[in-house]
Image (tube, grey):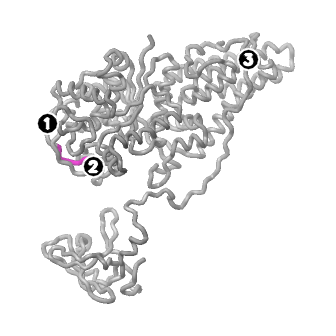
Amino acid sequence: MPKSFYITTPIYYPNAAPHVGTAYSTIVCDVVARYKRLTGYDVKFLTGVDEHGQKIQEAADKNGYTPQQWVDKMSLNFTTLWEKLNISNTDFMRTTQERHINSVREIVKRVNDNGDIYKGEYWGKYCVSEETFVPENQLVDGKYMGKEVIDVKEVSYFFKLSKYEDALLKYIEEHPEFIKPEGKKNEVVAFIKQGLQDLSISRTTFDWGIPLELEEGHVIYVWFDALTNYLTGAGFAKDPEEFANVWTNGTVNHVIGKDILRFHAIIWPAMLMSAGIKLPETIAAHGWWTVEGEKMSKSLGNVVNPAEEVEKYGLDPFRYYLMREATYGQDADYSKRAMVQRINSDLANDLGNLLNRTIGMQKKYFDSKVVLNEVTDTFDAEIKALWEEVLVNIEKRMNEYQFSEALKEIWKFISRMNKYIDECEPWKLAKDEDSKDRLSTVMYNLVEGLYKIAALISPFMPDTAQKMLNQLGLEVDAEKMKLEDVKAWGAYPVGGKLNAAEPIFPRVEFEEEPKKEYNENLTIENPITIDDFSKVEIKVVEIIKASKIEGADKLLKFIVNTGKEKRQIVSGIAKWYPNEQELVGKKVMAVLNLEPVTLRGELSQGMLLTTTEKKKTKLVIIDNEVKLGTTIR
């Protein structure tokens, strides 16, 4: 029975459509899954969506859906794209499924039975966008990873994460393959050594989640819920025999983005230790994608849509580019120019040209029939030796998640086969009847090399591999190939007949797109119409008197001349103007048709306009030549 290999993507938030980063994570897993199948493993490949939590509930409310209706709608974005990207997942997890709910309840029970859950009160910061509680020492300028946080105070159940500090450090030290790449492992170790805090695992301020059986009114905190999906997909709490085969006795690999590494390399293994479950063999964290050298974001309007890129360049070129361009674990840049160069150079010139030349010559010299009357020389020995070397190197690169290096190995062999044509000069051999047998050997080696190349590229470009097999006249399903069947030289059946050559990678012309000087996809927050704006009366006024307000450290009181009358305006800018008299005589902008209000006992008959930059607030000072009462439009 083949050994089980289990690989998982992160489960994605369905609030937003998938982008090139989510596509990359999933294609990485697909490539690994296909390679493991190629090398004889029984592969289970899980992906899915994380459908619980406060962020989901808020998005559903905002868009006029129930949470369940919302996730039903949004999860389709992922299943549709994975089909378009030819993802070979064997399971798709939705955390609202009953099998998962049962799985979460079982792990909570096991952890609680182990004495690792207790009731307490959480009082601190919470980041809604990242669905995580945030210790003060992880805040930078009051934010977590650049995201807003809110103050939360509520009764909660806690997991004794701090109990597992030493066990985690020991496990990581004893299992060097546990966290990849090496640099990420060092980050995790350093973080653990700072000291771990116990983890809140329940919430009471929203109800869109799995109810906690320990107490009514609590729902299970999203990470305790979400992380358990990996167990659910392996049959946990449903099929003990399957779980033993897939998880306990198999090889388990998680592929994640670097932003969620701590959850997977600290919280997750601690949960498993507490529940008495084997830890995964590998957690592999990859970097982020920039676009043309810039951070990818909605506000910049440069988010790469994978479906659109596939339509533009083709599926396999898109898959190849992502895997070839990125060094796993590091950030990578998505560039249209680089994409076109890869297609034209690597795919069309190197691989496509090798296939077309070989099939064309086989037809010309042997009427497309593959014959072999073996006459060898040193060139043959060189390509066979290189093949053996490439096989060893690819296995090593793939196991280390060095996909770009694995593709370099394949292309080393492709380049050598192209050079083999030039060295052996079959067009000259064809002119000499005495060289016919040597010609048959050269042509056989070229066909054999292409057969082997089709096998090696099948994890990365499955459609291309199938097209190559079809043109080579082989009735072989690329999805069911086994590397063992093509390892030895001489796998291609003598007597076979090639089919017609058809270009598999048409060349692409690079079209320089003029860079827009503005973002046409800009999202406006709290939009208003011109009619709304026309209701606001903004005029130039002059400050003729300024004074502090007793008992109000933040407020200043101004008397201003509007050009028609004098008004009193109160403004909260005392912190920025300790010498308020410097403002006397300055012309500034003021909103004059606000409803008057009383602040700290002082009447305010308008509002002075200010700017805020780097948490500093300043009045907008107007040139003295501008007349009092001038309307701002």
Residue receiving disc 3: 497
Helix, strand or loop at mark 1: strand
Residue receiving disc 1: 119
- In the rendered image, which quarter is residue 116 located in? top left
Within 10 Å of disc 1 (Cα), the crowding (few <14, some 14-19, many 20+) is some
Q: Residue at x 19, y 38 (%)?
A: 218
Image: 508 above or below 2: below
Q: Residue at x 51, y 23 (%)?
A: 35
Residue 567, percent from left and from top: 25, 84
Mark 3: which amino acid?
Answer: Lys
Residue 274, percent from left and from top: 22, 26
Q: CA distance from mark 3 to mark 2?
A: 66 Å
Q: Indicate left or right for 307 with 192 as reference.
A: right
Q: Earlier in the sequence, mark 3 or mark 2?
A: 2
Q: Which residues are magenta?
A: 122-126
Q: Indicate left or right for 525 with 196 as reference.
A: right
Q: Earlier in the sequence, mark 1 or mark 2?
A: 1
Residue receiving disc 2: 139
Answer yes or no: is residue 411 visible. Answer: no
User: In the image, is residue 124 part of the stretch drawn in magenta?
Assistant: yes
Image: 309 above or below 461: below
Which is more foreground, mark 1 or mark 2? Answer: 1
Residue 327, percent from left and from top: 49, 36
